[in-house]
Image: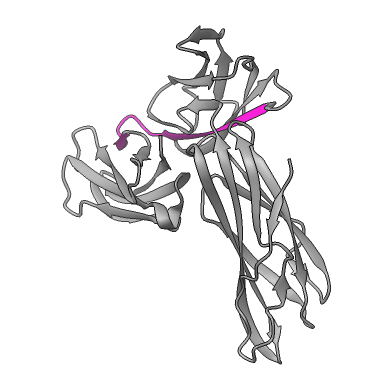
Amino acid sequence: MNLTLVLAIVALTPADGTPAPLHTAAPVVDLGEVKSGPSSSHTFELKNTGSSTLTVTGVSAGCGCSKMELSAKQLRAGEVAKLTVITGTLTQPEGAVVWPVTVHYSTTADGQPFDGKLDLKLSAKLVREVSVTPPLLAVSTAAGVTQTLKVEDRRTKPLTVTKAESSNPAVTAEVRAARSAEGKTVQEVVVSVKEELAIGSHADTVTLRTDDPACPVLEIPVRVHKRSADGVTPTPAAASVRFAAGQGEASALVQLRGGGKTVAIKGVECKTPGVAVKFSEDAGPVATVRVVVTAAKAGASGTAEVVVTLTEPTASTLVIPVVWYAP
Protein backbone atom coordinates (compact mmCIF):
# COMPACT_ATOMS: atom_id res chain seq x y z
CA MET A 1 0.00 0.00 0.00
CA ASN A 2 1.32 3.43 -0.92
CA LEU A 3 1.30 5.89 1.95
CA THR A 4 0.74 9.59 1.42
CA LEU A 5 2.70 11.36 4.12
CA VAL A 6 1.59 14.79 5.21
CA LEU A 7 4.24 16.74 7.11
CA ALA A 8 3.17 18.72 10.16
CA ILE A 9 4.51 19.78 13.54
CA VAL A 10 2.13 18.86 16.35
CA ALA A 11 3.77 19.02 19.76
CA LEU A 12 4.15 21.09 22.86
CA THR A 13 7.09 23.51 22.99
CA PRO A 14 9.23 24.28 26.06
CA ALA A 15 8.76 27.67 27.69
CA ASP A 16 11.97 29.08 26.16
CA GLY A 17 10.57 28.60 22.65
CA THR A 18 12.95 25.85 21.53
CA PRO A 19 11.43 23.03 19.43
CA ALA A 20 9.85 20.16 21.32
CA PRO A 21 12.44 17.41 21.92
CA LEU A 22 10.30 14.47 20.71
CA HIS A 23 9.96 14.62 16.93
CA THR A 24 8.73 12.53 14.00
CA ALA A 25 9.11 13.48 10.36
CA ALA A 26 5.49 12.63 9.52
CA PRO A 27 3.04 12.84 12.44
CA VAL A 28 0.03 12.77 10.09
CA VAL A 29 -0.27 9.80 7.71
CA ASP A 30 -2.94 9.10 5.09
CA LEU A 31 -3.18 5.35 4.49
CA GLY A 32 -5.35 5.85 1.41
CA GLU A 33 -7.99 3.22 0.65
CA VAL A 34 -8.18 0.45 3.25
CA LYS A 35 -10.34 -2.69 2.92
CA SER A 36 -12.24 -3.78 6.03
CA GLY A 37 -11.33 -7.08 7.66
CA PRO A 38 -7.58 -7.27 8.28
CA SER A 39 -5.93 -4.88 10.71
CA SER A 40 -4.10 -1.88 9.29
CA SER A 41 -0.77 -0.74 10.72
CA HIS A 42 1.85 1.98 10.42
CA THR A 43 5.15 2.54 12.22
CA PHE A 44 6.20 6.02 13.35
CA GLU A 45 9.85 6.78 14.09
CA LEU A 46 10.16 8.95 17.21
CA LYS A 47 13.47 10.78 17.69
CA ASN A 48 14.79 12.53 20.78
CA THR A 49 16.20 15.74 19.29
CA GLY A 50 16.95 17.22 22.71
CA SER A 51 20.17 17.06 24.71
CA SER A 52 18.77 15.12 27.71
CA THR A 53 17.39 11.61 28.13
CA LEU A 54 13.67 11.41 27.33
CA THR A 55 11.17 8.95 28.83
CA VAL A 56 7.90 7.99 27.13
CA THR A 57 5.40 7.93 30.01
CA GLY A 58 2.38 6.74 28.05
CA VAL A 59 0.77 6.22 24.66
CA SER A 60 -2.99 6.71 24.32
CA ALA A 61 -5.32 6.15 21.38
CA GLY A 62 -8.55 7.96 20.63
CA CYS A 63 -10.10 4.67 19.52
CA GLY A 64 -10.29 1.45 21.52
CA CYS A 65 -9.73 -0.45 18.27
CA SER A 66 -6.04 0.61 18.20
CA LYS A 67 -3.10 -1.24 19.72
CA MET A 68 0.37 0.27 20.17
CA GLU A 69 3.79 -1.40 20.20
CA LEU A 70 6.73 0.77 21.34
CA SER A 71 10.31 -0.45 20.82
CA ALA A 72 11.81 1.62 23.68
CA LYS A 73 10.54 3.88 26.46
CA GLN A 74 13.82 5.66 27.25
CA LEU A 75 15.69 7.58 24.55
CA ARG A 76 19.04 9.19 25.01
CA ALA A 77 19.84 12.30 22.98
CA GLY A 78 19.67 11.45 19.27
CA GLU A 79 18.14 8.00 19.75
CA VAL A 80 15.09 6.76 17.82
CA ALA A 81 12.19 4.52 18.95
CA LYS A 82 9.64 2.85 16.72
CA LEU A 83 5.94 3.12 17.55
CA THR A 84 3.72 0.72 15.60
CA VAL A 85 0.01 1.52 15.63
CA ILE A 86 -2.23 -1.42 14.72
CA THR A 87 -5.85 -0.51 14.03
CA GLY A 88 -8.73 -2.94 13.79
CA THR A 89 -11.13 -2.28 10.92
CA LEU A 90 -14.06 -4.56 11.80
CA THR A 91 -15.76 -1.94 14.00
CA GLN A 92 -15.12 0.97 11.65
CA PRO A 93 -17.79 2.74 9.57
CA GLU A 94 -17.43 2.86 5.81
CA GLY A 95 -15.90 6.04 4.44
CA ALA A 96 -13.39 8.47 5.95
CA VAL A 97 -11.96 7.34 9.31
CA VAL A 98 -9.34 8.89 11.61
CA TRP A 99 -7.26 7.17 14.31
CA PRO A 100 -5.57 9.68 16.65
CA VAL A 101 -2.70 8.69 18.96
CA THR A 102 -0.95 10.80 21.63
CA VAL A 103 2.55 10.11 22.97
CA HIS A 104 3.23 11.55 26.44
CA TYR A 105 6.81 12.05 27.59
CA SER A 106 9.03 13.71 30.20
CA THR A 107 12.54 15.13 29.91
CA THR A 108 14.68 18.09 30.94
CA ALA A 109 14.70 21.30 28.89
CA ASP A 110 17.00 24.21 29.73
CA GLY A 111 17.76 22.56 33.06
CA GLN A 112 14.09 22.34 34.06
CA PRO A 113 11.72 19.31 34.13
CA PHE A 114 9.47 19.30 31.08
CA ASP A 115 6.37 17.20 30.31
CA GLY A 116 5.22 17.19 26.71
CA LYS A 117 3.13 15.34 24.20
CA LEU A 118 3.32 14.48 20.53
CA ASP A 119 0.04 14.10 18.63
CA LEU A 120 -0.04 11.58 15.78
CA LYS A 121 -2.82 10.75 13.37
CA LEU A 122 -3.67 8.00 10.90
CA SER A 123 -6.47 8.49 8.39
CA ALA A 124 -7.96 6.31 5.67
CA LYS A 125 -10.92 5.74 3.39
CA LEU A 126 -12.46 2.47 4.52
CA VAL A 127 -14.15 0.23 1.97
CA ARG A 128 -16.38 -2.30 3.72
CA GLU A 129 -16.08 -5.75 2.12
CA VAL A 130 -15.67 -8.13 5.04
CA SER A 131 -17.56 -7.64 8.30
CA VAL A 132 -18.19 -9.56 11.51
CA THR A 133 -21.43 -9.16 13.47
CA PRO A 134 -21.25 -8.37 16.30
CA PRO A 135 -17.78 -6.77 16.07
CA LEU A 136 -17.39 -7.31 19.83
CA LEU A 137 -18.97 -10.28 21.59
CA ALA A 138 -20.14 -9.65 25.16
CA VAL A 139 -21.69 -12.30 27.41
CA SER A 140 -23.02 -12.20 30.96
CA THR A 141 -23.87 -15.62 32.37
CA ALA A 142 -23.95 -17.76 35.49
CA ALA A 143 -23.70 -20.98 33.47
CA GLY A 144 -22.49 -22.26 30.12
CA VAL A 145 -23.81 -20.36 27.10
CA THR A 146 -23.35 -20.08 23.32
CA GLN A 147 -23.35 -17.03 21.04
CA THR A 148 -23.04 -16.76 17.26
CA LEU A 149 -20.75 -14.58 15.15
CA LYS A 150 -21.62 -13.91 11.51
CA VAL A 151 -18.83 -13.33 8.99
CA GLU A 152 -20.10 -11.61 5.83
CA ASP A 153 -18.16 -11.07 2.60
CA ARG A 154 -19.56 -8.98 -0.29
CA ARG A 155 -16.83 -9.86 -2.80
CA THR A 156 -17.35 -12.10 -5.82
CA LYS A 157 -14.60 -14.39 -4.52
CA PRO A 158 -15.38 -14.55 -0.79
CA LEU A 159 -13.09 -15.81 1.91
CA THR A 160 -13.74 -18.96 3.92
CA VAL A 161 -13.06 -19.19 7.64
CA THR A 162 -11.02 -22.38 7.99
CA LYS A 163 -10.28 -22.35 11.71
CA ALA A 164 -11.34 -20.57 14.89
CA GLU A 165 -9.14 -20.22 17.97
CA SER A 166 -9.74 -18.74 21.42
CA SER A 167 -7.26 -17.21 23.84
CA ASN A 168 -9.16 -18.82 26.74
CA PRO A 169 -9.47 -22.64 26.97
CA ALA A 170 -12.88 -22.20 28.65
CA VAL A 171 -14.16 -20.31 25.59
CA THR A 172 -14.35 -22.37 22.39
CA ALA A 173 -15.33 -21.54 18.81
CA GLU A 174 -16.78 -23.82 16.09
CA VAL A 175 -16.89 -22.87 12.39
CA ARG A 176 -20.05 -23.63 10.42
CA ALA A 177 -20.37 -24.06 6.66
CA ALA A 178 -20.73 -20.93 4.52
CA ARG A 179 -23.90 -20.04 2.63
CA SER A 180 -24.83 -17.39 0.06
CA ALA A 181 -27.68 -14.95 0.65
CA GLU A 182 -28.68 -11.57 -0.80
CA GLY A 183 -25.51 -11.06 -2.81
CA LYS A 184 -23.10 -11.94 -0.01
CA THR A 185 -21.54 -14.99 1.59
CA VAL A 186 -22.35 -15.61 5.25
CA GLN A 187 -20.49 -17.97 7.58
CA GLU A 188 -21.38 -18.52 11.23
CA VAL A 189 -18.96 -19.18 14.08
CA VAL A 190 -20.52 -20.52 17.29
CA VAL A 191 -18.71 -19.33 20.43
CA SER A 192 -19.31 -21.39 23.59
CA VAL A 193 -18.55 -20.33 27.15
CA LYS A 194 -18.00 -23.40 29.32
CA GLU A 195 -19.56 -23.93 32.73
CA GLU A 196 -16.13 -24.15 34.40
CA LEU A 197 -15.08 -20.61 33.47
CA ALA A 198 -14.05 -18.83 36.67
CA ILE A 199 -16.34 -16.21 38.18
CA GLY A 200 -15.29 -12.68 37.25
CA SER A 201 -14.69 -10.54 34.17
CA HIS A 202 -12.64 -11.98 31.30
CA ALA A 203 -11.14 -10.17 28.30
CA ASP A 204 -10.37 -12.69 25.57
CA THR A 205 -10.03 -12.88 21.79
CA VAL A 206 -11.46 -15.23 19.17
CA THR A 207 -9.14 -15.45 16.16
CA LEU A 208 -10.59 -16.53 12.83
CA ARG A 209 -8.15 -17.87 10.24
CA THR A 210 -9.16 -17.71 6.58
CA ASP A 211 -8.04 -18.95 3.16
CA ASP A 212 -7.66 -15.37 1.85
CA PRO A 213 -4.00 -14.21 1.71
CA ALA A 214 -5.19 -10.57 1.74
CA CYS A 215 -7.24 -11.16 4.89
CA PRO A 216 -5.67 -14.14 6.68
CA VAL A 217 -6.78 -13.30 10.23
CA LEU A 218 -9.86 -11.73 11.81
CA GLU A 219 -9.72 -10.94 15.55
CA ILE A 220 -12.91 -10.43 17.57
CA PRO A 221 -12.75 -9.22 21.18
CA VAL A 222 -14.78 -11.38 23.58
CA ARG A 223 -15.81 -10.02 26.98
CA VAL A 224 -17.37 -12.49 29.40
CA HIS A 225 -18.80 -11.60 32.79
CA LYS A 226 -19.14 -14.91 34.63
CA ARG A 227 -21.27 -14.31 37.70
CA SER A 228 -22.43 -16.46 40.57
CA ALA A 229 -26.00 -17.72 40.47
CA ASP A 230 -27.12 -14.87 42.73
CA GLY A 231 -24.93 -12.23 41.06
CA VAL A 232 -25.92 -9.06 39.21
CA THR A 233 -26.95 -9.44 35.56
CA PRO A 234 -26.34 -6.61 33.04
CA THR A 235 -28.91 -6.38 30.22
CA PRO A 236 -27.69 -6.15 27.53
CA ALA A 237 -24.29 -7.65 28.37
CA ALA A 238 -22.58 -4.86 26.39
CA ALA A 239 -23.54 -1.27 25.63
CA SER A 240 -23.88 -0.95 21.86
CA VAL A 241 -24.01 2.67 20.69
CA ARG A 242 -24.93 3.41 17.07
CA PHE A 243 -24.54 6.78 15.40
CA ALA A 244 -27.02 7.88 12.75
CA ALA A 245 -25.72 9.93 9.81
CA GLY A 246 -24.58 13.34 11.06
CA GLN A 247 -25.22 12.48 14.72
CA GLY A 248 -22.54 13.81 17.07
CA GLU A 249 -23.66 12.17 20.31
CA ALA A 250 -25.40 8.85 20.97
CA SER A 251 -26.11 6.72 24.03
CA ALA A 252 -27.13 3.26 25.23
CA LEU A 253 -28.77 2.07 28.44
CA VAL A 254 -27.77 -1.01 30.47
CA GLN A 255 -29.99 -2.35 33.26
CA LEU A 256 -28.53 -4.21 36.25
CA ARG A 257 -30.71 -6.77 38.03
CA GLY A 258 -29.89 -8.72 41.17
CA GLY A 259 -32.37 -11.61 40.83
CA GLY A 260 -34.93 -9.94 43.08
CA LYS A 261 -32.34 -8.48 45.45
CA THR A 262 -31.57 -4.80 45.87
CA VAL A 263 -28.91 -3.40 43.54
CA ALA A 264 -26.94 -0.33 44.64
CA ILE A 265 -24.21 1.40 42.60
CA LYS A 266 -21.43 3.19 44.44
CA GLY A 267 -19.68 4.57 41.36
CA VAL A 268 -19.06 4.14 37.63
CA GLU A 269 -15.88 4.92 35.67
CA CYS A 270 -14.71 4.89 32.05
CA LYS A 271 -11.21 6.14 31.21
CA THR A 272 -11.74 6.41 27.45
CA PRO A 273 -11.94 10.04 26.20
CA GLY A 274 -15.33 10.93 24.76
CA VAL A 275 -17.20 8.23 26.70
CA ALA A 276 -19.28 9.57 29.61
CA VAL A 277 -21.28 7.49 32.07
CA LYS A 278 -24.36 8.25 34.17
CA PHE A 279 -26.02 5.93 36.69
CA SER A 280 -29.03 5.68 38.98
CA GLU A 281 -28.03 6.57 42.53
CA ASP A 282 -31.10 5.10 44.24
CA ALA A 283 -30.97 1.46 45.34
CA GLY A 284 -33.67 -0.85 44.02
CA PRO A 285 -34.43 -4.11 42.20
CA VAL A 286 -33.10 -2.54 38.97
CA ALA A 287 -30.20 -0.09 38.60
CA THR A 288 -29.37 1.67 35.34
CA VAL A 289 -26.16 2.78 33.65
CA ARG A 290 -26.28 5.10 30.63
CA VAL A 291 -23.26 5.34 28.35
CA VAL A 292 -22.95 8.52 26.25
CA VAL A 293 -20.41 8.65 23.41
CA THR A 294 -19.32 11.90 21.75
CA ALA A 295 -17.99 11.18 18.26
CA ALA A 296 -15.78 14.31 18.10
CA LYS A 297 -13.78 13.06 21.11
CA ALA A 298 -14.13 9.27 20.93
CA GLY A 299 -14.06 8.83 17.16
CA ALA A 300 -16.77 7.47 14.88
CA SER A 301 -16.22 3.93 16.16
CA GLY A 302 -14.33 2.08 18.86
CA THR A 303 -14.51 0.04 22.04
CA ALA A 304 -14.12 0.78 25.74
CA GLU A 305 -14.91 -0.65 29.17
CA VAL A 306 -17.10 0.76 31.93
CA VAL A 307 -16.25 -0.31 35.48
CA VAL A 308 -19.21 -0.39 37.88
CA THR A 309 -18.61 -0.58 41.64
CA LEU A 310 -21.53 -2.15 43.55
CA THR A 311 -22.33 -2.12 47.25
CA GLU A 312 -25.45 -4.34 47.01
CA PRO A 313 -26.39 -7.17 46.81
CA THR A 314 -22.69 -7.68 47.63
CA ALA A 315 -19.61 -5.46 47.37
CA SER A 316 -18.27 -6.26 43.91
CA THR A 317 -17.04 -4.85 40.59
CA LEU A 318 -18.76 -5.33 37.24
CA VAL A 319 -17.16 -4.56 33.85
CA ILE A 320 -19.48 -3.56 30.98
CA PRO A 321 -17.95 -3.57 27.47
CA VAL A 322 -18.90 -0.69 25.16
CA VAL A 323 -18.81 -0.67 21.37
CA TRP A 324 -19.83 2.28 19.17
CA TYR A 325 -20.01 2.62 15.42
CA ALA A 326 -21.94 4.07 12.49
CA PRO A 327 -23.80 1.32 10.61
Residue beneath the point at 17% across and 49% down: 283
For the residue pair 290 and 223, the one nearer the viewer reads as: 290
Residue 271 higher or lower than 15, as above or below: above
Q: Is residue 203 magenta?
A: no
Q: Farthest residue in the right direction? A: 78
Q: Residue 208 at what x, y percent from top left?
A: 62, 24
Q: Residue 168 at what x, y percent from top left?
A: 59, 30
Magenta highlight: main SS: strand
Instruction: For the N terminus, give its image quadrant.
Output: top right
Q: Residue 141 at what x, y percent from top left?
A: 38, 28
Residue 45 higher or lower than 167, as above or below: below
For the residue pair 277 and 48, the one nearer the viewer reads as: 48
Q: Quadrant of residue 6?
A: bottom right
Q: Quadrant of residue 22?
A: bottom right
Q: Is residue 225 magenta?
A: yes
For the residue pair 197 and 25, the one nearer the viewer reads as: 25
Residue 67 higher or lower than 138, as above or below: below
Q: How is the image coloured?
A: one colour
Magenta stretch bounds: 217-235
Residue beneath the point at 61% across and 70% down: 10
Q: Is residue 302 left or right of residue 117?
A: left
Residue beneath the point at 65% across and 86% down: 113
Residue beneath the point at 62% across and 39% down: 33
Instruction: For the C terminus, give its image quadrant.
Output: top left
Q: Residue 67 at what x, y percent from top left?
A: 62, 48
